[in-house]
Structures are given as C-alpha cells and as structure tokens.
Amino acid sequence: RAEPLVLGIETSCDETGIGIVRGRTLLSNTIASSMDEHARYGGVVPEVAARAHLEALQPSIEAALAESGVALADVDAVAVTSGPGLAGALMVGVGAAKALAVSLEKPLYAVNHLVGHIAADILQAGAATSTADDDGALEYPTVALLVSGGHTSLLLVRDLTTDVELLGETMDDAAGEAFDKVARLLGLPYPGGPEIDRAAVDGDPKAIAFPRGLSRASDMAEHRYDFSFSGLKTAVARWVEQRQAAGEPVPVADVAASFREAVVDVLVTKALAACRDYDVPRLLLGGGVIANRRLRDTALERGAAAGVTVRIPPLSLCTDNGAMIAALASELIMSGREPSTLAFGADSTLPV
Ligand code: KG4
Ligand code: ZN
C-alpha cells in the first residue's frame, strides 16, 4: 500500500495537537497548550480546556499545514482521538475532525489516545535508548508504560493495530497528578512535576522512606501491575504537617527527592516486572512525566541491567500530540483497517 498522508487531531486534555504524517514519516507536530490558563486553579479545568481547543484548532491546523508544506486537499485521511480523556475537550476535536473529513470527502479514523502514545515511537528519530542499535522500528512484543497528568497505564503490545492489552493502571491519582498535588503542598507552583524535579536535585532520595503503593506481597497478587499514589501523597502531607507542627523547617529538597524516588521506584519496578513475567525484552515509555530526569535515568539503568531495551521517544512526541494520533491511523490504514463511520462520539473512558 502507498504511504497515506494523514492529519491527526488530539484534544483529550489541555493540549491542542495537530500532526501530519506520511506513512511513518513525521511532517509536522504543532502543539498549543492551555496549561497557563489552568495554572491558577492548580489543575486542568475541563470547561477551560474545551474552550481553548475551540479557539486553537483552526490556527493550529493552518500552522501544521504550513510547517509541512502540505495542502489540505492532498490529505488522504483525518484521524482524531475519541477517548479516553475529558469529555468536553474530546468533543471539540471529534466535531472538528468530522467536519473536516466530510468537507474533504476523506475517510475518518477514530483512535484511542493510549494506543496513540505507543504509536509515537514509530515516528521517533533520535530517541534515547539503552542500546545503540536502534533503527527506529517498533518491535513486538513490547511493554509500554504511559505516565502523564491524566493516566498511568502499563500495557502489553503484541501488535499496535490488533493486540494491545492493558495490564494495569492507577487506582487513584495519575503519576503526574501526584507530582502536581505534592508540589502544591510544598508550596511549589503548577505544573508541579518540573518543579519537584528541580527541587529534588539538591535533595537526598533516601532521606525519608515514603511508601511504595501496591507493592506489598499481598498487593502483588491482585494488583501486580496496578498503581496507587494517593497513599503516598497523604504520607507526604502528614510528614510535612508533623514538621510544621513541631515548628521545624520543611526540608523541601529532601521531601521532593524522596517523593520522586518513591514514584519512580514503583513505576520502573512494575514495568520491568511485566517485562520479566511476559518475557518481553523491550520497554517503551510515554507521557509527559517521562520528562522526569530520575525516571528516565532509572528506567535506562535498571532496564539495561535486566536486559531490557528501554525506548524513550523525544519529549515532543511523549507529551500529548496530534502526530501520534496521525501515526496510529497511518498504521491502521496500511494494515487495511476500514475507516470509522461518522456515528462515533467522544468516550471519556474508552478502553484500549
Ligand atoms: O502528558 P502531559 O504533558 O499532559 C497531560 O497529562 O495533560 O503531562 C503533564 C504532566 C503534569 O502532571 C506534569 O506535572 C508532569 O506531567 N510532568 C512531570 C515532569 N514534567 C511534567 N512530572 C515529573 N517530572 C517532570 N519533570
Ligand atoms: Zn496522554
């Protein structure tokens, strides 16, 4: 099959992402974020995100076309995230994608956001990996760990277009959300992930023994690949309160480093356990939390020690973006998948 020219639209959270790919080649990836508008609320406000998408979509599509030198009329297919994500935010993208596909008389592909994150790896050039012999091809099977402000999921990918299995996910807060909440109680601004990462540089990761969620032997039977960060968040809050009650200063760097270590340890331990259990020597990382230095380094080091090749696409393809959505649709088209009918809606809890 010829390589399709696909325009992808992503609006599941606070990023308006437009991506254009031809086959497996990335042509453009424009991202407009409404993060600044949410900062004063300390988290993404769905209504604000939806309105921002509505305003950003048209200019973003024009920017993506200009960047790639592609004429809208030449696009072979339109792709859009139909879930999971914020319902109102998703609806803006889905509505726009339908309108575009109908007016262009081109097929429309509704895709899953989490599977899209995995597809990002197909487009990667210059990814950081624990091995030198990386030719950019996504090999199967692979375990994928997706960590962002909205999701924390561990998946087994036997085939991107036909066989993606959810092994586990967070039972409460997403990893990024935990970073944001702990940053807040340490008096650091939103988004908290980068702030904690920075504060942790001068801290001792072993200073405070914070709990590792769902890691006890009794948890490992039923929740082997699941995550929980709310207990950790509470433990940090207690620790800080006790310090303050005693009139002692809070050692922000040590708290940040110890908290970060607890999150990273659980994420990497469970991901590598899945690799071992399923005898899969590859681990793909995705989602905005991958920006975390300690997470990247720990995954690369412990992966190498376990004989697992760890793949980390460039950050612009790890955070929410439209290129990964276009890439997934491109794979679906090349594998012969029929387009979606126009009857689909936005599904905030769409399963993989
Ligand atoms: O994928 P992403 O850009 O978008 C959404 O989830 O919407 O991820 C954003 C999340 C935020 O929770 C942010 O605090 C977190 O990723 N994050 C980080 C770091 N950079 C961003 N968490 C930990 N360490 C970082 N360096
Ligand atoms: Zn995402």
Image (tube, rainbow, N blue to C red):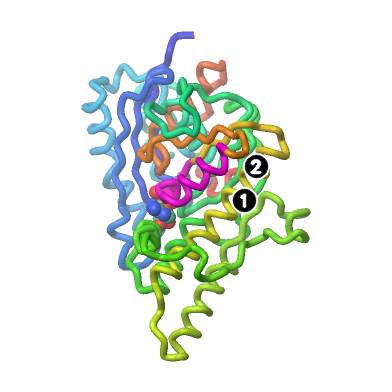
Residues rendered magenta in the picture: 286-304
Residue 288 falls inside the magenta stretch: yes
In front of the other: 228 or 320: 228
Instruction: Tell me, yes or no, if residue 339 can be seen here.
Output: yes
Relative to 81, residue 175 above or below: below
* Secondary structure found at label 1: strand
Relative to 123, residue 213 above or below: below
Q: Position of residue 333 (x, y in %)?
A: 51, 19
Q: Is residue 76 left or right of residue 306?
A: left
In front of the other: 264 or 6: 264
Q: How many marks?
A: 2
Q: Which residue is mark 1?
A: 169
Identity, as a three-letter code, of the amino acid under mark 1: Glu
Q: Which residue is mark 2?
A: 166
Q: Position of residue 286 (x, y in %)?
A: 48, 41
Q: State the residue at coordinates (31%, 53%).
A: 34
Q: Position of residue 27 (x, y in %)?
A: 32, 24
| Label 1 – label 2 distance at C-alpha | 8 Å
Q: Position of residue 253 (x, y in %)?
A: 39, 68
